Amino acid sequence: MTAPPVSLDAEPDRAAGASPRRPRPATVALWAAALAALVAYLVGMAGVTGGDLDRMGGLGLVSALPPVALAAAMALGALFFLALNGAVDRPRLQLFLLLAIVLALHGAAALVEPLPRFPTAWQHLGFVDYIERTGHTLPLWDARFSWPGFFGLAALLLRVGGIDNPLPVLQWSQVGSQLLCLAALTVLLRALELPRRARWCALWFFVVASWVGQDYFSPQAFSYALYLCFVAVLVSVFRRTGGRADGPAEGDGSREGSPLERALLLGLLVVLFLAAVAAHQLTPFVMIAAVGMLWLTRRTTLSFWFPVLLAVVALAWISLEAEGFWSGHLSTIFGGMGQLGGNVSSGVAGRVKGDPAHQAVLYLRVLLSGGWFGLAVLGWWRGRRAGRTAGRGDRVLPVLALMPFFTLGMQSYGGEIALRVFLFALPGVAALAALFFYPVEERRPRPPWWTAALVTVWAVVAVAAFGVARYGNEQFERVTGGEVAALGWVYQHASPSARVLYPGPVGNPTTTPAIPWNQRAMDTVAYVGTAAPPDPAAVDAWESALQKAGPQSYLVLTRAEGADLTANDGYPADWYARSRASLDADPRLVVVVSTPDAALYRLAREPAGRAPRDIGAGPIGPVLRWTGWTLAEAGLLGVLVPLLLWHEVVRLRTGAWAGRRRWAFGGLAGALVCGFLLTFVERFLTLR
């Protein structure tokens, strides 16, 4: 029998009929300081103006914020650990400070910027708009349409909720994502039964270490929350701490409950996985790796065939639902397979470039990541010495922290694979780092003085570093009203279609633009990356590109694009201002929209002809070419999935199979899996 899960924190027991205790003076003082710090932060942020944002430097948003706001944010971190290290449990105060630091760190941009940040979030809104208008996808137009789960769900919720203006959803999506992740992480930490202070510390570390910036309105934020929920259920319900290698064993530490209850929770695992499969390319494989590694380390009661089931489903989606993505692009998918050095280089060294201020931001991110992993290693070591991690968390936490590194050998993921590794490792890293400071449940009321001092100093440093690491690119990641107005004019006049030229670096002009693109009219407005001349006076290059693009073509130039080219590609610091001046003065061009942040141009004499009605978006999805191998794969899938799921449900009721029954099922399932893999590979080779 196992003890019931321990709550994240608990009030001291009171005798029946005893009068409630009065708050201690120290508690009252901490509450007053916490409220004062939060109010000071909000007042400081309220004083930030648009002019302050326009003058931000190479360190990003922190260079535009008043010192009082920065000091208040650091004070919130220090106060959290003053409360945590006290002799009295203060769960309400700790929760208040945890939520306050989420608002202060992840809601900073939403508090001072009038529009949602990050241009790609606006593009995702365009995916949602297209699905809501048409009810289908365009898988050949963008790879993300092959994984439309998030966009379809968002379209449904916006319609059901009657939300006509989704911009507030985008504005506060980062705070919402953090809260969802914290809820799932709380369940996970309770299941691992870490010391009380370690659990609170791990939650706080997770918040302040989440600088990667993937929690905006996006499929990866949605699927990351699904991943944390998946792992929380996996560890809470199907965890094992001892016993035999397969099947639940007496005293194995797995969650008690009826077979029906455990079967329903197994179904929840499958539903979470299916939602991730339909929404994101990478996350399902991290889920599979988590189950597989826990099985290899004998820390789950699920059998070997459960991760096999998940892998079959993920591969089937790629083969049958994402054909529009992989057909003709196999080199893009598998080109980085096994190239560990190249993937690491593109994800770390390849990203450290640009002007000195931008390089400083990137080096800080590398240093900060190394610092968190270093703390995690020390936490594992100290926990082992203290005997704490010889129990439930001894293998689970290292598995969660190290398992994502397998993705480094898959592909570069557009140069972002190192960021994704850190992101998926963060739950385990945060918990292990907390064990460095709080490895055991202290018998004395306070931790050692050096622990309290060291963790408080680290908290202040981590908050300060977060501001630069997270918002260091804000010069070209913020979205302004001028940019929205310029592209809004295009949307209103894109009949039957339009082309928008945007500047990109010489050598890679089609890089993702730093403009709120594709928010609407995804099927009628095409965006064309055009090499930006380093010489701002070279207007001929722009005029030639507009002539080549044909009728209904426009050139958009924004302050954010200029900052991006300066920070990442070595363009002059005044490139945007000088280019605007040259374009404004050229008689061959007409200014359509002009704001301080953006300008829209067209040719004074448009090319002859009419704009094409079709911009080359391709057929509606899903794109699926049926062959004999397709039928065979679908048939094997229809047999394998129910069979493997039935096997896992039966094990929950009867325990692990043994003898001939086990070998017979293994032979049958193994043969079917081999047949499925054969049809999968043959289909790829046939339709490539």
Image (spheres, rainbow, N blue to C red):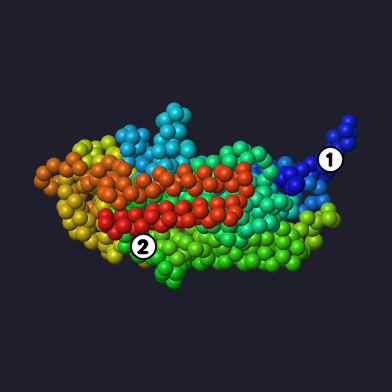
Residue 213 x/y as whole percent: 50, 53
Which three-letter amino acid code belongs to the residue tagged 1?
Asp
Closest to the observer, 616 or 641: 641
Spot the residue most to the bottom: 341
Q: Residue at x 59, y 54 (%)?
A: 658
SS under mark 1: loop
* The C terminus, quarter of image: bottom left
Q: Does the rendering let one see residue 539? A: yes
Query: Left of 602 or right of it: where is 672?
Result: right
Q: Is residue 587 left or right of residue 377?
A: left
Q: Amino acid at mark 2?
A: Phe
Q: Residue at x 46, y 41 (%)?
A: 170
Residue sitting at the far left: 608
Q: For residue 380, which numbered disc appears in the image?
A: none
Closer to the N terminus: mark 2 or mark 1? 1
Q: Residue at x 84, y 56 (%)?
A: 444
Q: Position of residue 210 (x, y in %)?
A: 56, 54
| Front residue of this view, candidates 407 and 604 | 407
Q: Which residue is mark 2?
A: 334
Circle on res. 13? 1
Report how far apart the C-alphas of labels 2 and 1 lie in the structure: 59 Å
Tell me which residue sits at (44%, 71%) in the image.
341
**Left or right relative to 237: residue 117:** left
Above/below status of 200 relative to 369: above
Q: Residue 349, located in which quarter of the rendered image?
A: bottom left
User: Tag 2: Cα neighbours inside 10 Å, few (<14), some, or many (≥20)?
Assistant: some
Q: Indicate left or right for 1 with 225 as reference.
A: right
The image shows residue 339 at horizontal and vertical percentages of 41, 69
